[in-house]
Amino acid sequence: MSDRPARTEEEVLDAIERRRRRPVRKLLEDRITLSHGAGGKATHTLVEALFLAELRNPLLEAMGDSAVFEAGAGGPRLAFSTDSYVVSPLFFPGGDIGELAVNGTVNDLAMSGARPLYLSAGFIIEEGFAIADLQRVVASMGAAAREAGVTIVTGDTKVVERGKADGLYINTAGVGVMERELDLSPATVRAGDRVLVSGTLGDHGIAVMVARGNLGIEVDLESDTAALAGLAAHLLDAVGDGVRCLRDPTRGGLATVLAELALETELSIMIDEPALPIVPAVHGACEILGLYPLYIANEGKLAAIVAPEATDAALAALRAHPLGQDAAVVAEVRPDPPGLVLLETSIGGSRVVDMLAGDPLPRIC
Amino acid sequence: MSDRPARTEEEVLDAIERRRRRPVRKLLEDRITLSHGAGGKATHTLVEALFLAELRNPLLEAMGDSAVFEAGAGGPRLAFSTDSYVVSPLFFPGGDIGELAVNGTVNDLAMSGARPLYLSAGFIIEEGFAIADLQRVVASMGAAAREAGVTIVTGDTKVVERGKADGLYINTAGVGVMERELDLSPATVRAGDRVLVSGTLGDHGIAVMVARGNLGIEVDLESDTAALAGLAAHLLDAVGDGVRCLRDPTRGGLATVLAELALETELSIMIDEPALPIVPAVHGACEILGLYPLYIANEGKLAAIVAPEATDAALAALRAHPLGQDAAVVAEVRPDPPGLVLLETSIGGSRVVDMLAGDPLPRIC
């Protein structure tokens, strides 16, 4: 199918203008809480009321997973993204902080439609950290980078005194190239569009949480950390401009991603609860812990908003890829009530799903 | 003057091959020490024996202040760099962590000859950190970005529990565009070249150290944190390919920068001690603390290695810029003894100057 052309500058400015007109949530606290890092409501308030307010510029205000810009006059469009990783424990079933740090930034670039190319890596290490563990983490980054087809080209190492970090924190930033004319953006979402997820929800968050060993539960579950650039490219190759927008539901989970989208598009999103793919281990752990899987992070799943007529092709494309075998259509975009996400439960009722509030699972990425 | 053409791929591979043939220093420790973050000998050993060994690729192995690559086929050459900032205290005379985080990455890009364009910002915040302080830091980043002509386009916020950080750590990564054909690289350095510094040495390190208030000394001194992109461009405009290579002497100071260069070029560098511009406050503090100013960080000074015939023009160009008024010619590149830096003292003797060992000044950036 033909690619939908990139948004005009006017459309981009219009979207930013709409965001600016929305009432900015106020920071009510005097001090940072764990919620400010959870990716949910408090994070969004902090970003809007502080970071955007101080650093205001159109690229930042676009608030995509990556910033997209032209590299020099007439150069290719590039995507640029960053994430810091503070996951605890550093090693968990299915992965470690190094693999996560590569895949997470690769995925942010991929969700913008870019082909990830180059990563930077910044290490903040606590004095006394075992060099053998550092070696294991860096080896894991190397393997993840090769797997994702990216190169770690520049880095930095800082060491802080004992008690001033928790072993190891890693920041990665990434540069990718936009090889498609396609503009993946919430601005293109329309009522009638469908929301697909590429697989089971909440695996990463619960796997890390259980790995901490302080919950008194054991489950047979691995993190789903994976690089999604291949899956995203496969989907875009198959469906082209039938794809409106891609997001990876990490911190805050699918609920937060959809709540942001509803707000941004001034549309409604109705989630079909029985359609949500969730493995029994995640269901069970969530029930014991009083959590809702829709708020639990993945690190190797994507959510795709696709045009109604492209839904079947998109689902088939996702399922044909090794990382998308459990893909499902889980929600529909509707005109009303604008800005809200609703959940249609298996017993027939419906309720509003807001962004994550608080932080039930600190430091899962 | 005409620009010197960029190195051929063959020359770059040749330089990497030479580096590979050098015996790799071994990591003798089992655990990370503060020295591994000091930017001196231990940092270099860690980078060579662990990071390069695990992540081996030509861009990383070039070990410049930035990685330089083409953005897509036929696209412009870009520079990409990252640094984390863990300075303590967060606010110090002449600057704060926010300003430092912008200027530091801007300077890494500028030292590669790039025009810095876009920055990312990743925040790791300790639970309980005052939002007013965060606001002050972010405002300072905004001001520094405007001053340096760069835009902060993407970011990330993580929060860790009380006692798992020290208030605030910031990572910035930056993308710049190489608008000149010039290749600034140690491979172009020749015997007879001169080393210039753009101003007084050690101001930043001593200002931060004293600001901690635990030394029992008071000095009237501010950090020199500044964006060097304007100064670098001014110098390159004036002297073109008379400039071989630029470095900003941050962690490890000028001594470490020159020791790296001597090693990389297999040439010798003779420092003229009486020519080193050092303010009395830095001299005095260093004497009391038993430190040598050549190892103390700057955050707003550059070292330029220039061809002998370009020395006068380079010095004049630096001095004509507000950030280069105290510029001086401080060293000369010589053929022997290869790989070593010597210091010619004011009393006539000479001694070997090695990279920084240990970490007399932890967390000054």
Image (spheres, coloured by chain):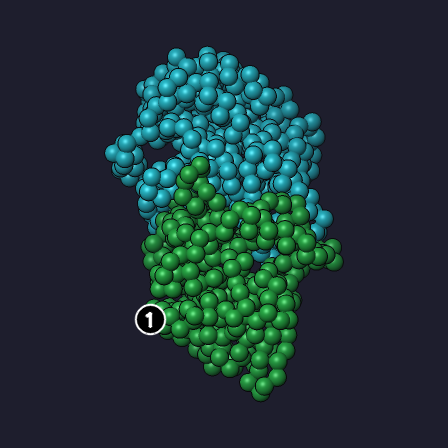
Chain colours: A green, B cyan
Front residue (pair A363, B46): A363
Q: Residue at x 46, y 67 (%)?
A: A307
Query: Percent position (x, y) of residue B183?
Result: 37, 29
Q: Quadrant of residue A35?
A: bottom right
Q: Residue at x 36, y 16 (%)?
A: B192
Q: Residues within 10 Å of mark 1 (few under 14, many from 20)?
A: some
Query: Percent position (x, y) of residue A67?
Result: 51, 49
Q: Residue at x 55, y 16 (%)?
A: B320
Front residue (pair A18, B361): A18
Kindly tell me whether residue B308 is visible in this rendering: yes
Q: Residue at x 56, y 29 (%)?
A: B300
Query: Percent position (x, y) of residue A334?
Result: 57, 71
Q: Quadrant of residue B264?
A: top left
Instruction: Give the residue type that dot 1 points to.
Output: Ala
Which residue carries the number 1 mark? A320
Q: Quadrant of the N terminus of chain B?
A: top left
Q: Quadrant of the C terminus of chain B?
A: top right
Front residue (pair B243, B250): B243
Query: Percent position (x, y) of residue B75?
Result: 37, 39
Q: Is residue B234 left or right of residue A315?
A: right
Describe the element under mark 1 as helix, strand or loop.
loop
Kindly tell me whether residue B172 is visible in this rendering: no
